[in-house]
Amino acid sequence: MGIGDFIKKQFIDVLQWQEDGDGTLAWRHPMQDAEIQYGAQLTVRESQAALFVNEGRIADVLGPGRHVLKTSTLPVLTYLQNWDKLFESPFKSDVYFFSTRLQLGRKWGTAQPVTVRDKDFGMVRLRAFGVYSYRLADPKQFFAEISGTRDIYTVDDLEMQLRNLIVSAMSNTLGASELPFLDMATNFGLLGERMKGAMAPVFERYGVALDNFAVESVSLPEELQKAFDARVSMGMAGNLAAFTQYQTATAIPMAAQNEGGLAGIGASLGAGLSMGQVMTEAMRGSVLPAAATPATPAAADTPEARLGKLKSLLDGGLITEADYTAAKAELLKQITG
């Protein structure tokens, strides 16, 4: 290596960073024990910022543009180095570039279910998922609080630190929202706005501006999902007597096309109507045995009596296992309040 190459290697006269789209938020310019030439050219592209650090102390931050490095463009560094107006020598300083562009489509989610209080189900465990976007707004704060002296700091590094903060804020937001689980699907926008309001100060502390926060899914664990499905089934059935009449009316034109016609479904109609009446009365706790004297109200109203009637319908093949499970769940909910 000649003396010219040695001198060229020791003094840097051009500083710039060409992002490669790999999700890097902070990048330290390789100095290799070299010094920056006085009057060197610093190019900061749009959606970038450059930070000078002198002996571990944060100095100047330069935004987009082409900068000639001298005392007038580095006032803080000039003050720290006690340079006078005639300073024209190479100087030593670490230079960090930061990406300030918007980071879109970043995913968040709960690794484990979060326990919250629900109006309908009591204490439930929920999972939630969504996306958010942010940008680096304050390079000084970000360097001091997050990235530090690393050569490279990526979006994945940042999100590892933010993940627990997001889950904690989500838990608090869901717990304080007073929205029952049944209404959450129609209020994802409201939940997202509340989450953004809760998370924005946390992001700001680290020099990051939260641009958007969206909730895309809130779900129950499998065992609670089954109970939820049963409740929905009961709600769809509504008044069981009316539901049975609807089923019967629907079956009439179909039966007319089968062998035996309408005459062949007389027994089915009777059984269907009776089954609907019995199930309805069983849910109300006031079923009266056919062609028998009324049972005493106390006996007919006991939970055991109601469940026994439903079990008899199941054993007699008048209702399906799904009907029995859904009716039993609703009955138990009425009993326990």
Image (tube, rainbow, N blue to C red):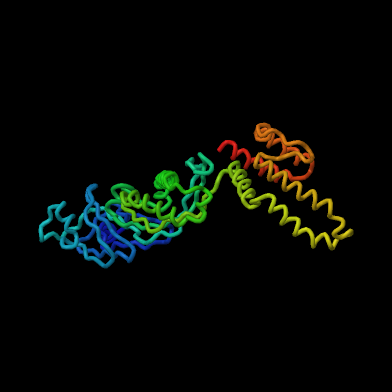
Name which quarter of the figure residue 308 lies in. top right
In the displayed structure image, the side of residue 265 where residue 293 appears, left or right? left
In the displayed structure image, the side of residue 94 where residue 328 appears, left or right? right
Name which quarter of the figure residue 314 lies in. top right
Q: How many marks?
A: 0
Residue at the image position 24 percent from the left and 47 percent from the top: 56
Residue 133 percent coordinates (x, y): 41, 57
- Seen from the viewer's position, the closer of residues 85 and 24 is 24
In the displayed structure image, the side of residue 237 where residue 25 appears, left or right? left
In the rendered view of the protein, which quadrant contains the C terminus? top right
Farthest residue, direction front? 293
Q: In this view of the protein, can residue 250 be seen by the observer?
A: yes
Residue 37 percent coordinates (x, y): 22, 60
Residue at the image position 64 percent from the left and 51 percent from the top: 238
Residue 319 percent coordinates (x, y): 75, 45
Q: In this view of the protein, can residue 160 be seen by the observer?
A: no
Residue 271 percent coordinates (x, y): 79, 48
- Seen from the viewer's position, the closer of residues 146 and 35 is 146
Residue at the image position 43 percent from the left and 60 percent from the top: 104
In the rendered view of the protein, which quadrant contains the N terminus? bottom left
Farthest residue, direction bottom? 66
Name which quarter of the figure residue 91 lies in. bottom left
In the displayed structure image, the side of residue 110 where residue 300 appears, left or right? right
